[in-house]
Image (tube, rainbow, N blue to C red):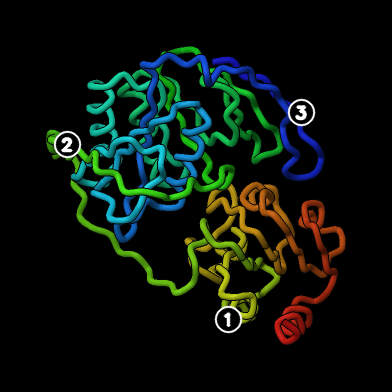
Amino acid sequence: MLAAVLARGARRGVAVSLSCSSWAAQRTAAASTLVVSDPLVAGAVPPATLSVIAAAQQLGDESVTLLTDGVPSEPVPDCISSILVMGGGKTAESVAAAVQSVAKEHSYSHILTSANKFGSNFAPRLAALLDVSPVTDVIQILSEEEFVRPMYAGNVLTKVQATDSPLKLLTVRSTAFDKAAVTKSCDNVTELDLPEWTASIWKGESVSKNDRPDLGSASIVVSGGRGLKNGENFGLLEKLADKLGGGAVGASRAAVDAGYVPNDLQVGQTGKVVAPDLYIAVGISGAIQHLSGMKDSKTIVAINKDADAPIFTVADYGLVADLFEAVPEMTEKL
């Protein structure tokens, strides 16, 4: 695997300009792509997987096979030619074993999944089972074997050429690709008869209920940091999010570590990576691990009383003010 570091601009999100040849048209007819879906949500393909499918389309394969944990009851993207249903558990061991079994029966050129907690949980194990080197956190596809991924918390973009195996295993950062449009139902569905994995068993899950949009798919995110001083003051952000149409509320790692909010609200390298249309950072200084999780947002607004806070280096609009005065006033005037 050959890595070449690409120069990146000082500011966030500078596009990498590289020319691609007509490699997509030259792919062999035998080449095909498998996308491993996140667990279905109410019968629908999750937004993160729709972004992975969009990435798969850039590989030049007109037909993509989708591997899911159930039969979708909602429409799927037009490029999905067949759906394989693995059923069974959701542990990394069972998912990796299922994908390995499918890969043995088909000559896939690429296997893609999301770079979120689901994909990152089973992809390393799958790579070991298939004896391939995975390319993780892909944000751009240059050719069928060349990809771009971030390093050092997003401060460097690396062009990776995967040549160690005919099969490429990729995890895709969903925020880097638009979601594929869902346009049709797919009747070519096969329920797989796979051996049951018994070494570990999926017992269930406890999911916290939240009326707000999911951080990873919300178009508006209002996040708070340690500057809010306590968890109760996050109510200021909730009111602002409501005025903006019901956006999601997030937090910096410092706020989570301080116990202000639960860790499922954490935005950053060790939390959730988001790229909403509007990201408002309130009382967040802008630590590098936080910036790596939100600097691809379309528009960034920062509110901080410290004019030298790093968050202003990536912000499109900055307000140097006391958040306890600025946020209520902003909410009132919206």
- Circle on res. 232: 1
Task: State the count of labels.
Answer: 3
- Circle on res. 89: none
The image position of residue 221, as x and y in percent, is 61, 65
Task: Examine the image and state in which quarter residue 198 appears.
Answer: top left
Looking at the rendered image, the disc whose residue lies closer to the viewer, 2 or 3, is: 2
Callout 1, which amino acid? Glu
Q: Which residue occupies 49% across, 26% down?
A: 60
Helix, strand or loop under label 3: loop
Q: Which residue is mark 2?
A: 192
Helix, strand or loop under label 2: loop
Q: Which residue occupies 76% across, 33% down?
A: 8
Looking at the rendered image, the disc whose residue lies closer to the viewer, 1 or 2, is: 2
> In this picture, is 89 found above or below 257?
above
The image position of residue 54, as x and y in percent, is 50, 40
Neighbor class of circle 1 (other Cα within 10 Å; few <14, some 14-19, many 20+) is: few
Q: Which residue occupies 29% across, 44% down?
A: 186
The image position of residue 301, as x and y in percent, is 75, 63
> In this picture, is 187 found above or below 148?
below
Nearest the viewer among 241 and 259 is 241
Going by the image, does 57 lie left or right of 225? Answer: left
- Give me the C-alpha separation between circle 2 and circle 3: 45 Å
Looking at the rendered image, the disc whose residue lies closer to the viewer, 1 or 3, is: 3
> In this picture, is 112 found above or below 258?
above
Callout 2, which amino acid? Leu
Neighbor class of circle 2 (other Cα within 10 Å; few <14, some 14-19, many 20+) is: some
Specify which label sits upstream in the sequence, 1 or 2: 2
- Circle on res. 7: 3
Specify which label sits upstream in the sequence, 2 or 3: 3
